[in-house]
Amino acid sequence: MTAPPIKKVRGMTKKEQLRERWQTNPKFNRHKASREIPMDLRTIQRYIKEFELGVPADSQRGTGSEGIKKHFTTENGCIELNSYTICDKDDALRIAKIDLDRWKIEKYTFNSWQVSMKVRQITGEDTTETKTNYQHKFDLKLKIPHPLETAITELIKEIPAIASKKPPKYMAESGVAGEIALVDAHFGKFAWALETGRRDYDLKIASDDYYQACAKNLDWLKPFKPEKIFYVLGNDYMHTENYWGTTPRGGNVLDVDSRLPKIIKTAIAIQIACIKMCRDVAPTEVIWIPGNHDEHSSLWLACVVEQAFNNDEFVTVDISPEKRKARLWGSLLVGWAHDIHSKYPSWNNELAQEFPELWGQSTFREWHCGHKHKKMETKMHPVITQGGVLIRQLTALTPIDAWHYENMFTDAVPGGESLLWSKKNGVIANFTAWSDAPYRKRQSA
């Protein structure tokens, strides 16, 4: 289907008026031009591209070679520019918008050939014209390290100054230990209160919520003078771990706030600050439990934490590859897993099967897990052995986002938990620092 010819206005076509404004007005505004010249914005954009490249707008919609083709990998890139008017390398560089501070031109290739093409005149007739097609090809190589590498390198430089030499406040035997179990923080997640009916959530809010939840729970644990702190790291601490903003295995597209290097630097800084806060109360053991959102990022995060405190005798980090771990504290056995996703009786047996020696020494047995974004406790009874296993579904720090709202997973109230362990009596207290303002009043956009 052919487009109707452009009508003349005051002796000039709409296209000619557009070209004149584009060439003479340094503050050319496409939206303003669309209002002043009866032409839709998409057409204006096609014509502007024609003015820049010297490629007919109709050709841009076809399958020809005119225009710009770009292909980039982590360390290399290739830009190919085809035009009927641009034959100068410097002009091609300007149009291709190559950042020479970041990219080095490894190879430049220039070709040209004759092309016969049909051109539709204003009268509606087709004529054949022969033009020269100029091809500029730039093979590029990255000058500077990848932004993700840069972010981690810069943070590592700061690590030697982080660890403290001052002994923790509580060193005497008390028979109690504290567990900081802040699960499902989802650093980097974006949620809009007007869309979810709950509360906003972004990188800054996540940082404030996590730090405040850790501080509040420590304040509640301090009066009991714990002789050790168990600090669980992971459990979907990170919302995404790649530039595409997707989950590691399912590839589901997520609502992400900010760029990945910024998320990483912020996430690491908050972790180190919170672990240092725990370490100043009592000797702290950091235990890595990966989630389904941070399956890989939580591991390198644990490695960074281990490096940060490698000279601190009061901080240890367990980065062993098992995704489920357990600790014995007197007569209490606690196991951690991100998701209890099968039938509960199977998990009851799993604690005994995976940690038989610890099971035999324990009287009180529990699984602590996250993932479901809500608070729940289920008492389970073993099939053969005596005693019971308590499965604690810990509450999530993050509020709901658009996906949760659309799928009606809206019953969670965000908060972060801690537990007080006794060598004789198992878990004797459970504290929850609820996030401020779980519901936000809806306002007009």
Image (cartoon, rainbow, N blue to C red):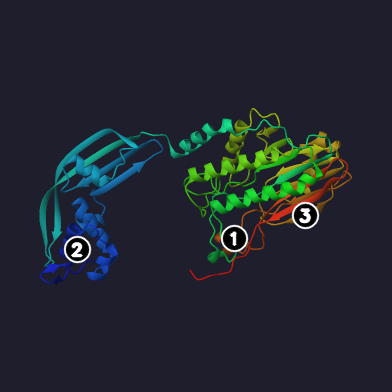
Q: Which quadrant does the N terminus fall into?
A: bottom left
Residue drawn at (22%, 46%), measured in percent from left and top?
A: 82
Instruction: From the viewer's side, name the closer residue of 90 and 101.
Output: 101
Q: Measure the C-alpha gap from mark 3 to mark 2.
A: 68 Å
Q: Circle 1 sits in a helix, a strand or a loop, which is it?
A: helix
Q: What residue would you read off at disc 1?
A: 404
Residue 274 picture location, percent across and down: 65, 42
Residue drawn at (64%, 27%), measured in percent from left and top?
A: 311
Which of the 4 quarters of the picture holds residue 134? Answer: top left
Q: Which disc number belongs to residue 102?
A: none
Residue 52 picture location, percent across and down: 21, 52
Q: What residue would you read off at disc 2?
A: 18
Amino acid identity at mark 2: Leu
Q: What residue would you read off at disc 3?
A: 377
Residue 259 picture location, percent across and down: 47, 47
- Residue 303 seen by the camera: yes
Residue drawn at (18%, 39%), measured in percent from left and top?
A: 111
Q: Is residue 444 above or below residue 42?
A: below
Amino acid identity at mark 3: Glu
Q: Circle 2 sits in a helix, a strand or a loop, which is it?
A: helix
Instruction: From the viewer's side, name the closer residue of 399 and 125.
Output: 399
